[in-house]
Image (cartoon, grey):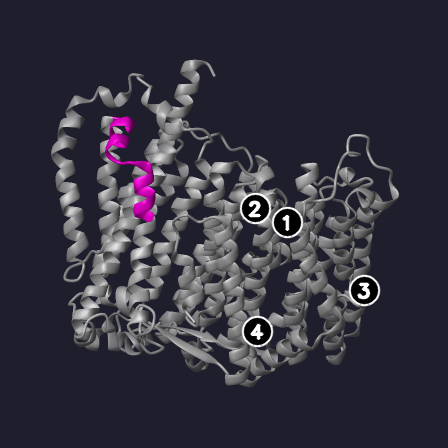
Amino acid sequence: MAAPLCLFLKRPKLVWLFTCIVTALTFLISVLLLQQVITHGTLVYELGGWAAPWGIEYRIDQLNAFILCIISGISAVVAMAAHTSLQKELSKDRHIYFYMLYLLSLTGMLGIVATGDAFNVFVFLEISSLSAYALIAMGNDRRALWASYKYLIMGTVGATFILIGIGLMYQMTGTLNMHDLAQRLPEVSQTRTVFVSFAFIVVGVCLKLALFPLHLWLPNAYAYAPSIVTAMFAATATKVAVYLLIRFTFTIYGLSFSFTTLPLNILFLVLGLTGVFVASVAAIYKNNVKHIFAYSSVAQVGYMIVGLSVGTAAGLTATLVHIFNHALMKGALFLALAGVMYRLGNVQLSGFQGLGRQMPLTMAAIVVGGLSLIGVPLTVGFISKWYLVLAVIENGWWPVAVLILLGSLLAIVYLWRIIEMAYFKPANEHSETVKEAPFSILIPVWILVIANIYFGIDTRISVGIAQSAAQSLFGITP
Amino acid sequence: MVSVAVAIVWMKDLIAVVMLLGIYGLLTASFFVAMDAVDVAFTEASVGAGISTLLLLVAIAKTKRAEHPVRHKPMLALLVVVVTGGLLIYGTFDMPIFGIAEAPAHTHVAQRYIEDSYAEVGIPNIVTSVLASYRGFDTFGEVVVIFTAGIGVLGLLTVSGGTGRRNQEITTKKMHEQHKVLRIVAKILIPFMLLFALYVQFHGDYGPGGGFQAGVIFAAGIILYAMLFGMNTARRVINQTLIQLIAALGVLLYGAVGMLSFVNGGTFLDYSVLLTDPIAGQHLGIILIELGVGLTVTAVITIIFFSFAGREEIQDYRNDTGA
């Protein structure tokens, strides 16, 4: 089980092929892991041979095995396209560093998800964010540096907040192990120190998560990073943060503390919904397609948080399903954009004129991804909206359900702008020579697109796992 | 400390600010000593007061000395700071009293560290046994963090084209060729610095210290040398590819120790199975991983320094040739 991490340690001579093999292997291992967890229950692995509260342990239950699969799967698919896309966007001598950082950030994210130790989370958070800053700053555009710098400041503040929170928790309980913390926190849960530690952790994680008022770093960081990086992070990074939030609020602090003692659910609900609307409206007015999808990511995070705020197993299921589905759709969309970037050199909306005819496969992928984003039946987006609305209605929050559907209408508006440009406008003179994206990008894109449709029709796998993971979380936390 | 912090914010001259930051680091270090956290103090002294000051100075030398005048009033930032500070103070109200023996932090996990670590790990410095053995995986993560930083800097600052060959042609008269006194003093000092670093490295089991601190001190020695004797002389001593390999080697060494214990039937980073005697195995494992830490830290800091400092010479070269 430590094997997926050990694989990353063979650092010298990292090349694309090696990256692909490693990510594919990791994905394989994650899937096997998930199967094992489903059949045998929670797995525990003690690192260094010391038992839990003294040493550090990995604790894999259905929740994080599920997320591990998503992350490693997406990164494996994205890595396939990396080679071709990078040739246009990064000078040759930096490729090797790129792949190293790519693997390092994957290591960090997997580590955050797998570990059962609160401080270990912070360590891996550092790995993944440091490599993320560097990866984003590698963008061609000079603005990438500024975007990355902003992200660095925000991210560091977030990480420091999390660290302060963990430190305060340690002071009150004397332990860093998550499982142990969950048992020892209720004794001291009425102290102000614990309240403050909770506040710091939630704010810190929400910074990473790009929840509505704290999302300002995200759009530029996504827009100016190399396309591959965007595809990778849009599909995985915020998911890891959502996972952390679930871990901290549900497992460690416990549901009753987070939602009953503190009005966190109201806060999440309001922020989530505002996030959906503000970000969707912002997306409508953007002209860089990467910007549009980046804002839409912020909106989607809003949906996930709304799912959390419901505070029932159904709500959590909706969030988990949406994590899975959103990873698929954003992965597909941004990878397709990488294809456009490869041919056009930019992703301004005006450049999309007539692309529907010139790059039919790429644009079709964007359309399917977009439909999925809106939540049209037969795509994964529909499934997550469906479960979210069900969970909300089950709780009797009718107005919220209506608002969620209104949010989808906004998504139609910003996606229509792209589709209109691509299919109903004649091609520019200078773009008439544009050809279809190369196969090395198209294949990964279509793998994701087909996954979008497949999991939109056959929901047994995604929803089944999400449901049992959510229920097991509610089983642990009374 | 408070007065120094305020002074840092008010000062406009960046060199003075850096110096004050160094003082701040030193004060923090003495603060840690006062709280009986010698190892942390050592780290803070070498990192906060030592190497980061050096790196900041290099950065200033590459850019400008004066701060840009700021017009806007960052009220929002101030508000956030005040709220955060207020929350922190609010949080302290219910904390256990400082130094009290019954505090949960002392009675739960730490108790075993203090009472049994010598019997289980076999080295007198508890801090080292916690960070290298009980929580060895965290330390492994930290080494990877440092490695990531090094690779990140390399990835961002690598300029296309063979920079190494060009630099050797540069023969501009530099500051470092003028300060004779400094050079002579440094010549005497540097061997001792390096020696001290090695002492810290291998003595981490018994006294305060270990791979992190040793690596930082060692790198400081190298940087001092490079600053006073010129980048090219230093480059001739330290090969760039070699140092990158060393950085990777450190991480690999750490990982290899982990894998070895994995192969020997234990879990990842379980040193007890390395040798037949578990205590000796622990000891060996810790020495090896500390060596890995030291190697990576030294190499990465040197990499960062060289890539920052190297830029200027490339620019100089371009200016010289009018390119």
Q: Is residue B300 visible?
A: no
Marks 3 and 1, Cα distance to the nearest angstrom? 28 Å
Which label's residue is closer to the chain start, 2 or 4? 2
Is the residue marked by circle 1 packed among few (<14), some (14-19), or many (20+) residues within 10 Å? Answer: some
State the CA–CA distance, disc 2 to disc 4. 48 Å
> Which residue does the numbered mark 4 point to in the structure image?
A262
Pointers 2 and 3 in contact (CB under 8 A)?
no
Badge 1 marks a residue whose secondary structure is helix
For the residues labelled 3 and 4, the Cα–Cα distance comes to 36 Å
Residue span colored magenta: B230-247
Q: Nearer the viewer, residue A214 or B155?
A: B155
Q: Amino acid at mark 3?
A: Val
Quarter where residue B271 is shown:
bottom left
Q: Is label 2 or label 4 in front?
A: 2
| Three-letter code, disc 2 | His
Mark 3 or mark 4: whose residue is earlier in sequence: 4
Residue carrying label 3: A376
In the rendered structure, the residue with mark 2 lies on which chain? A
Residue under label 2, please give it.
Answer: A83
